[in-house]
Amino acid sequence: KQEVTQIPAALSVPEGENLVLNCSFTDSAIYNLQWFRQDPGKGLTSLLLIQSSQREQTSGRLNASLDKSSGRSTLYIAASQPGDSATYLCAPENDYKLSFGAGTTVTVRA
Amino acid sequence: DAEITQSPRHKITETGRQVTLACHQTWNHNNMFWYRQDLGHGLRLIHYSYGVQDTNKGEVSDGYSVSRSNTEDLPLTLESAASSQTSVYFCASSAETRGRYEQYFGPGTRLTVT
């Protein structure tokens, strides 16, 4: 059974700081890993998908890295803005199924 | 635009009643999933389907059932609702695109069992 841990559970930073969100998983036989954003009371929005053959993926201010063999992924958000405040979820994929961590709740203070 | 929708968005029901939550996607995705999200547990997989007439149990399937009669829909049925099934339910779908299976989520259904 895939176990996913996200550290830290919560993070509060002033606007402009870079964010580093960590994710670890126990089963390295993954096909993909997705990072999602969830706003309070809302659904999940896919931010990035990294295939197991990739080491990193970038989209705008977001960069995600993947070290499959050690079971780790990191999401970097550059120059944070108050609009980045949300919960970020990491989800490795095994056999087309996602397993989720509890998430990191980010607050960016103006 | 293609999308995934869930209905109802909010539902209050009584213990023991049968409840069906609808999920409809217009992407023609083969894979569809149901998750529940609870504080302290994150998202957990209830049931999933890889195509028409295919259904499989996930991590927390007791008390739930699904059926897949077409590509677009995967309804989730609570046979006899219990207070422990009060939760937010998310439907998702995916298909292969250039070697990637990216999952897309619906807006969720908030279910309260009284």
Image (spheres, rainbow, N blue to C red):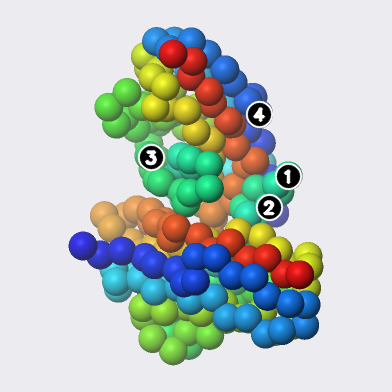
Label 1 amino acid? Gly
Label 3 amino acid? Leu
Q: Secondary structure at mark 2?
A: strand
Q: Nearer the viewer, residue B55 or A16?
A: A16
Q: Secondary structure at mark 1?
A: loop
**x, y percentage for residue A37?**
46, 39
The chain holding disc 3 is A
Label 2, label 1: how many angstroms apart (C-alpha)? Answer: 6 Å
The chain holding disc 1 is B
Mark 4 closeness class: few <14, some 14–19, many ≥20 residues within 10 Å:
some
Seen in the image, is A57 located left or right of residue B20? Answer: left
A57 vs B52: above or below: above
Q: Are marks 4 and 1 in contact (CB under 8 Å)?
A: no
Label 4, label 1: how many angstroms apart (C-alpha)? Answer: 11 Å
Circle 1 is placed at which residue position? B40
Total labels: the figure holds 4
Label 4 amino acid? Ala
Circle 3 is placed at which residue position? A47
Mark on residue B15? none
Asked if badge 3 and badge 1 are on a common chain, one would say: no
Q: Secondary structure at mark 4?
A: loop
Farthest residue, direction left? B1
Circle 4 is placed at which residue position? A9
Label 4, label 2: how many angstroms apart (C-alpha)? Answer: 16 Å
B91 vs A72: above or below: below
Asked if badge 4 and badge 1 are on a common chain, one would say: no
**x, y percentage for residue B59?**
69, 64
Disc number lying in front (4 or 2): 2
Mark on residue B38? 2
Label 2 amino acid? Asp
